[in-house]
Amino acid sequence: MPNSFTEAVMYVQVAVPVPMRQLFTYKLPANLQEPSINIGERVVVPFAGRQLVAVVIAISDSCEFDANKVKAIIARQQDEHSFSDAELKFLQQCANYYHHPIGDVISQALPVLLRQVDSVDIKKVEVWQACVNEQESSHKDENSLTDILAKLAKRSPKQAQLYKIICQHQGITWTELRALNYTKTQLNALADKQFIVAKELIPQAFAWQDKLLNSDDKHALTVEQALVVSSVTQKLTEFSCHLIEGITGSGKTEVYLQIMESVLAQNKQVLVLVPEIGLTPQTLSRFEKRFNLPIYLHHSGLNNSERLQTWLAAKQGSAAIIIGTRSAIFSPLINAGMIIVDEEHDGSLKQQDGFRYHGRDIAILRARQLNIPIVLGSATPSLETLHNALSGKYHHHQLLKRPGKSVEAKIELIDMAVQQVEQGLSASLVHEIAQTLARDEQVLIFLNRRGFAPAVSCQECHDIISCGRCNKPYTLHQGQRLLICHHCGSQKRVPRQCSQCGSVRLLPLGQGTEQLEQRLAEMFSEYSAVRIDRDSTRRKGELAKLLQEVSDKKHQLLIGTQMLAKGHHFPDVTLVAVLDVDGALFSYDFRASEQMAQLLTQVGGRAGRASKPGKVLVQTNYPQHPLLQDLVNNGYHHFAVQALSERKLALLPPHSYQVLFRAEANYPSYPEKFLRSLTEQALTGCAFAGPIPAAMEKKAGKYRFHLIIQAKQRRDLHRGIKQLLNNIKDNPWHNKVRWSLDVDPQDLSW
């Protein structure tokens, strides 16, 4: 007869951060049953010889397995950092839609420090305040803040600017100040002079007051802008999705700010997603000028402790505004009021490895779950978003004019076939650059290829130095004297002679941003040139520093890659030149034309953003190409509507739905055989395309193939994927390849 005093055995199902599409069952020992365990709580479990932090998904008093073989939980992380039911439901929906292991999805939503087994020592957040009264400052002889600033500005202008910002906000974190391009040295100097003091921030939900709004920075809205603000603010109490399609420079940010004012006035939080870190300082600066409220950042440039602080501030309600890149969508908003996705078309919002989610799409999913509005903004909306807007699924708002005297720059094509070309620059372009510089205006030259040259060739035997792991040419980086493979990252010293014939006649082929910078510096030696790409901005804070120097007109010639194309405001840039875009006109990826049209429009939008008229010049060998002609003569919206018609005829997204299966292995036949076996299964309502070699068939020593599965109905596609995943363990090739699937793929040229 069993002992009636025996403790009842409890079992929990947990999500473990491993690439397995299942939950795992563990025993809850009697000594860990008090206080009662909750769903969403973090626990430490033994798994494959190690200890991992898992999240409780279900609790039961019975178990379908042999109880003697079920392992016990090691510890409970009993703190306030658990998931709510709503957050778990959202993450489960994400895992189901992207067919990704739930444990990995939940792990991505947790800050790194909360994924660790050891308990976290959470550092206290400090904010900086100005010492503007005698009790806090030794500067009793100063009569006013104006006197302090005047004296400080003469000695240290940058410190004076920093002091002014701290005075305006009276409680700003070092993370925000760093993002605004200030240094620790400047901050410490002000502290040593007793102009500022650090105080511990006591977490509490923010409360709106009219004095927290800086009305001096508020601009008068145009009729178009006012209509958009009115339309969105009328729907703040329910889910609604709004697309703001505004030409570059049409004042979308001002519209965001005035909509946010209505949300913040209700003491609700606003989450703002931007595609890249480079846009964060600019966005933060605009928001800081308008709102004296707690603004927190979330992006990969922050350390683990700083990202945890943002996560906690969002959860506690002390963060009024959270600005971040795509992963900020997982912030645990306690009182969400609105989500804004800026540059919603940008490819950076799509995660390209691991959990391949799209930040914009799951932002819409989250807004629907929270029953709050979401605003998508772009001058060049993605065809998926535009299709939803034109079909009435989203509210569609257009901003067709720039405020003030600024006029959108027209795109002009330069036919390279009839031009005298010197070092990749046409004579017409060189003349235009010279005239622009003579007017004391800035020039932006866009070339989406970093490095000095994309290849190095032997002039005797014509051998091209290639990466053996990828079968692709090495890129020459002259400044580092290195050959670097941009695909796998391998690098080697530039050889003195050809490995095939021994010749010393090795010459670079083609042109990259590094070479272009050198050429322009030689041609226009009296002007300063700056290059902004991934190589020149590797150091922390370097990008913000260079952008500030451009705004201060320390440089007249700007050379850069896509980093310069997105959302930046340079008032004195009146000429934008685009080099070497012809490759996208003939890509096999059906999205290439859309991406090129977006890129040309976005880059062109950097020209003439203030009162000075702008000009955009595009060098091409195919000036009569229909895509370029449509874009030049009719603009992006017309191009996008035409492209949607073509996609409909071809039954391509958004008029159908796709999943991309990727597979790679050390032997070329393995991935093809694995994917081929998947096509042998009959999937109702689905069609297969492939398997075919990837655009880059070999990378880092692996041979790569892919398979596209397409369906007219989304439910048919997801039903088919589930069927494939259920049977994949029986596939004889699945253990011989590394495979992944990508729902709604954005890049077929992986």
Image: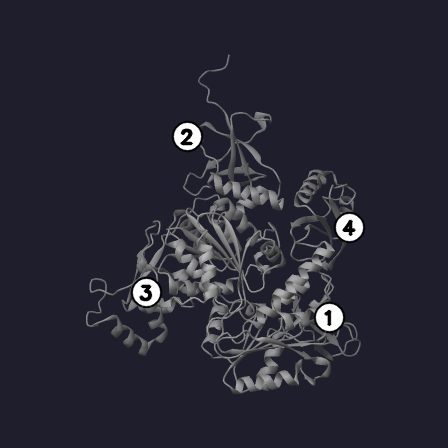
Q: CA distance from mark 4 to mark 1?
A: 29 Å
User: Mark 4 falls on what kind of element?
Assistant: helix
Dot 1 or dot 2, earlier in sequence: 2
Query: Are the two marked residues, 3 and 4, in contact with CB atoms closer than 8 angstroms?
Result: no
Residue that mark 3 sits on: 168
Using a 10 Å C-alpha cutoff, classify the residue at mark 3 as few (fewer than 14 neighbours), some (14 to 19) or many (20 or more): some
Answer with left or right where residue 707 lies relative to residue 153: right
In the picture, residue 453 is in which quadrant?
Answer: bottom right
Using a 10 Å C-alpha cutoff, classify the residue at mark 4 as few (fewer than 14 neighbours), some (14 to 19) or many (20 or more): many
- Identify the residue shown where x is 61% and y is 67%: 636
- Identify the residue shown where x is 62% and y is 73%: 447
Using a 10 Å C-alpha cutoff, classify the residue at mark 2 as few (fewer than 14 neighbours), some (14 to 19) or many (20 or more): few
Q: CA distance from mark 3 to mark 4?
A: 62 Å
Residue that mark 4 sits on: 672
Question: What residue type is disc 1 on?
Answer: Ile
- Identify the residue shown where x is 69% and y is 74%: 495
Q: Nearer the viewer, residue 247 or 537?
A: 247
> Vertically, is 651 above or below 571?
above
Image spot of residue 346 (x, y percent) = 58, 61
Q: CA distance from mark 1 to mark 2?
A: 66 Å
Q: Quadrant of the C terminus?
A: bottom right
Image spot of residue 651 (x, y percent) = 72, 53
Dot 2 or dot 4, earlier in sequence: 2
User: Mark 2 falls on what kind of element?
Assistant: loop
